[in-house]
């Protein structure tokens, strides 16, 4: 069974905060967590969300969100930067490490001076392409064993149809290499209105109609504060009203919450 998770940031705030979009860094700790007691609506431009060791949400700066090309990746060791070959020729949006291998994805078409369409691997001494790559930007990478999962704005992977997400199987560990489509709704989305909200909120999302769905609400420390079983819904656009209450039936305090 294929399961797709959709995550969004939801702010519970007093009505006075509506329409105000402070910069997200103003409420982030140095390690990317939302500060305790933060409330309001924050502009996440230039940041992407990831997860910490306890599955708590973290926010990290994207590589050069101003639009300037990012330099090639490097590694930090006691105050000295080291180049990784000649790097890549445009922006890097995603990085994943597996053993001695570094995978990078972004808006580049070359790595180490050789063709590498939007994704490449650094083995510690040289760059390698992942087959024919994909045909547009890669914004997320995850590695599990010999499998490398990539997400982005592409419609093809290895020359085959692949809607926004695909898997690469590394030939160097004895498995045939291929980029294959993972069947996920191309219209998968999750929206909340109003956001910020002073009480409840209407959640809008897409259902693929294949398995039961569950609504989960997390606080900024990664704690699950509310869960609701939605059952198996028909495929297509759906809406669900959440009243802003936690699992104890009490209204949640003002602050930032995450909806999955």
Image: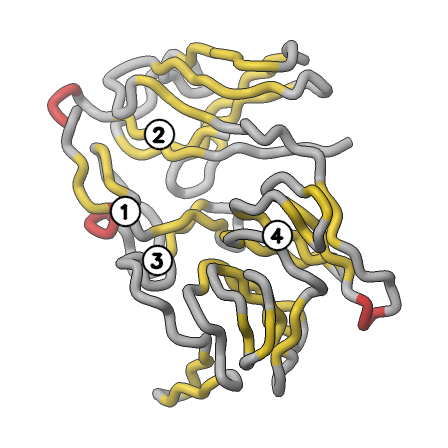
Frontmost of labels 4 and 2 is: 4
x then y, percent, for residue 127: 61, 78
Q: Which residue is mark 3?
A: 61
Give the mark nearer the N terminus: 2 vs 1: 2
Residue occupying the point 54% across, 27% down: 187
Disc 1 secondary structure class: loop
Residue occupying the point 45% across, 29% down: 259
Mark 2 Cα shell of 10 Å, populated few (<14), some (14-19), many (≥20): many
x then y, percent, for residue 246: 42, 20
Q: CA distance from mark 4 to mark 2?
A: 26 Å
* Left or right position of 89 against 41: right
Give the mark nearer the N terminus: 1 vs 4: 1
Q: CA distance from mark 2 to mark 1?
A: 15 Å
Q: CA distance from mark 3 to mark 1?
A: 16 Å
Query: Which mark, residue 10?
Result: 2
Q: Which residue is mark 4?
A: 150
């Amino acid at each position: 069974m294929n399961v797709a998770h959709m995550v969004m940031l939801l702010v519970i705030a007093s009505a006075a905060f509506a329409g105000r979009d402070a910069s997200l860094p103003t409420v982030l700790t140095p390690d990317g967590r939302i500060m305790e007691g933060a409330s309001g609506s924050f502009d996440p431009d230039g940041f992407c969300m990831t997860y910490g060791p306890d599955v708590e949400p973290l926010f990290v700066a994207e590589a050069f969100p101003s639009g300037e090309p990012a330099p090639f990746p490097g590694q930090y060791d006691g105050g000295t930067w080291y180049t990784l070959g000649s790097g890549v020729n445009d922006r890097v949006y995603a990085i994943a490490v597996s053993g001695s291998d570094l995978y990078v994805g972004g808006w580049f078409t070359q790595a180490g001076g050789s063709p590498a369409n939007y994704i490449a691997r650094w083995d510690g001494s040289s760059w390698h392409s992942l087959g024919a790559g994909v045909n547009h930007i890669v914004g997320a990478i995850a590695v599990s064993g010999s499998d490398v999962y990539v997400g982005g704005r592409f419609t093809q992977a290895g020359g085959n149809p692949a809607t926004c997400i695909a898997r690469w199987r590394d030939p160097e560990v004895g498995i045939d290499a291929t980029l294959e489509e993972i069947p996920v709704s191309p219209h998968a989305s999750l929206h909340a209105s109003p956001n910020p909200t002073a009480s409840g909120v209407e959640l809008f999302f897409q259902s693929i109609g294949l398995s039961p769905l569950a609504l989960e609400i997390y606080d900024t420390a990664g704690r699950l504060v509310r869960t609701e079983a939605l059952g198996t819904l028909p495929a297509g656009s759906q809406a669900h009203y959440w009243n802003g209450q936690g699992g104890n039936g009490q209204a949640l305090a003002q602050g930032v919450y995450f909806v999955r």
